[in-house]
């Protein structure tokens, strides 16, 4: 998980930086560790180089959480392959899912104008980089100081009420 602290950034900046960073990492592996990647291609997975090149060169697909859920609901298959479906079958590229529902994310996320979603994103590279990690989302978000919670649409009282509801 990568959690950079970027001053004065918004969700668009966050997504752009995640994309640039993932591309950089894959290109760096191709440029500086090519022999190791060839070894992996021979003995572990024949598509290692293709996957790295795909991430280094492809345009990342961006969908809101709501759009991602709608795409997955149309899918006939069920189970744990949701990330694989989004990254391999649907978009054939890494996928950035953003604007998650406020109820399922931490209280330090910036609440969007709709007051239902938060400005948070995750970059899914699972199918592209399955060799590097069994599950590799880059989750980049915002760090918000407690004194600024209310300016982000949260209040300490509402957070306490929500935690009581979860316990009961």
Image: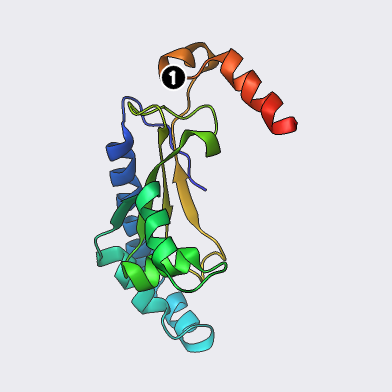
Report the residue at 42% width, 27% height from top.
110
Report the residue at 48% width, 27% height from top.
143
Report the residue at 29% width, 58% height from top.
61
Q: Quadrant of the C terminus?
A: top right
Which image quadrant for residue 113?
A: top left
> What crowding class fits label 1: few (fewer than 14 Cα within 10 Å), some (14-19), or many (20 or more)?
some
Single out the residue that lies furthest toward the bottom: 42
The total of numbered circles placed on residues is 1
Secondary structure under tag 1 reads loop
Q: Position of residue 103 (x, y in %)?
A: 53, 35
Please say if 149 is above or below 39. Answer: above
Left or right of 25? Residue 162 is right
Which of the pair 143/168 is nearer the observer?
168
Q: Which residue is mark 1?
A: 153
Which of the pair 116/57 is nearer the observer?
116
Left or right of 93? Residue 165 is right
Left or right of 163? Residue 12 is left
Single out the residue that lies furthest toward the top: 147
Please say if 69 is above or below 47. Answer: above
Whether residue 126 can be seen here: no
Whether residue 64 can be seen here: yes
Q: Position of residue 13 (x, y in %)?
A: 28, 38
Which of the pair 40/59 is nearer the observer?
59
């Amino acid at each position: 998980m990568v959690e950079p602290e970027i001053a004065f950034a918004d969700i668009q900046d966050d997504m752009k930086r995640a994309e640039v960073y993932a591309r950089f990492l894959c290109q760096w592996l191709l440029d500086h560790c090519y022999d190791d990647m060839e070894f992996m291609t021979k003995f572990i997975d024949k598509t290692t180089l293709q996957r790295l090149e795909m991430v280094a060169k492809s345009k990342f697909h961006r969908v809101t959480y709501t759009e991602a859920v709608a795409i997955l609901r149309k899918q006939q298959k069920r189970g744990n392959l949701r990330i694989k479906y989004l990254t391999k079958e649907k978009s054939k590229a890494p996928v950035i899912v953003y604007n998650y529902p406020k109820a399922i994310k931490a209280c330090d996320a910036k609440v969007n104008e709709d007051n239902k979603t938060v400005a948070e994103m995750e970059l899914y590279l699972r199918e592209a980089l399955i060799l590097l990690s069994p599950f590799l989302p880059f989750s980049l978000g915002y760090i918000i100081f407690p004194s600024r919670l209310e300016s982000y649409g949260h209040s300490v009282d509402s957070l306490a009420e929500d935690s009581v509801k979860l316990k009961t």
